[in-house]
Amino acid sequence: MSTPSDAPTATVRDSDSQDHWELSKLPRNARPKATAGQYRILDHRPIGDRYMALTLDAPVIAHTAQPGQFVMLTAARRGEKTPALPRPMAIYSTDVTAGTIQVLYGVVGSGTKRLQSFEIAEEMFVVGPLGRSFEIEEGTRRVLLIGRGIGTCSLTTVAQANADNGIETIAVTSAREPSALIGADHYRSHGAKVYEVTDQTGDSTPEALFATLTTDWDSNPPELIMTCGSDRLTRVSEDLAVRWGSRVQVSVEAHMACGLGYCHGCASGARSEGDESPLICNDGPVFSWEPVSAAVCTP
């Protein structure tokens, strides 16, 4: 979660495909109650030349956050009125023992530039954990994570949870160039098999990635694929799911004003029985990504 890139829309297959794929709400699983408060900054440093890593002393969030959830960070200091709107950020990692959470973010606009100005020992107003988490069914043995750029941050806590639960993790981190890759060391620290692919090296194309993963995992494929950060990686996930019979879950990135479902400004575009499409902040950001018969999609 952060400023959206080319995140998936409700349907990505072209009109000639037999099946369209769409967002669908996951079961309304129990989730922890969100808290709001001032949290002390323990560390705040650059990661390469693109990103910042922010570590907060937030024991309640660290103990309750589930994989794929996010927090809203307020860039205005206490007593300031601007910027008025908080920024949604995926929880990159948690440390229950230390009572800390870490988020990674790119400095892309005035709000994140203001976040960048916060120093160690300052306090930041945070709301979280928010949103619905990834769902791993009982009996799952192997999970494939496919993330690109800052979208990878929505997937990293899955690897942590998998390590605790004896589930094997395969992780793909993709970016334009090697210096922009995120999460590889974190994944490896939790026992994941990691693929680092970039546009610069030519191994991040859908065709190349599909070939690599099918060569390595056709004989023992993952039951579940999770993805975030790129429309083209969602397409790869679809093709792999069809080949392997795997389920797909996607974390959708979006601009958010509140993160709580009050403003109704982050509709997902997914089908709904009601008048409004499910909200990314409240019904997501994690959704099931499922094939729908072309006949169903035809008005």
Image (cartoon, rainbow, N blue to C red):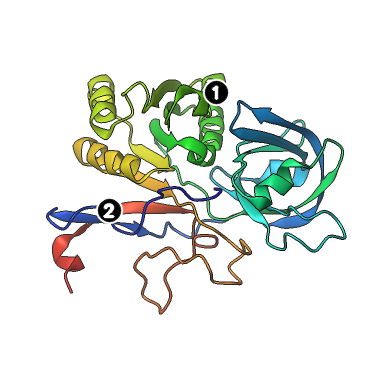
Q: Helix or strand or loop: what does disc 1 sit on?
A: loop
Asked if one can make out residue 283 in the rendered structure from this viewpoint, the answer is yes
Circle number at residue 12 = 2
Circle number at residue 190 = 1
Alpha-carbon span between mark 2 and mark 1 = 32 Å
Residue depicted at x 79% and y 42%: 118
Q: Is residue 81 left or right of residue 253?
A: right
Q: Quadrant of residue 296?
A: bottom left
Residue type marked 2? Val
Q: Quadrant of residue 173?
A: top left
Residue depicted at x 27% and y 34%: 206
Q: Is residue 32 left or right of residue 15?
A: right
Q: Residues within 10 Å of mark 2 (few under 14, many from 20)?
A: some
Q: Residues within 10 Å of mark 1 (few under 14, many from 20)?
A: some
Q: Helix or strand or loop: what does disc 2 sit on?
A: loop
For the residues bearing labels 2 and 1, Cβ distance under 8 angstroms: no
Residue depicted at x 31% and y 24%: 202
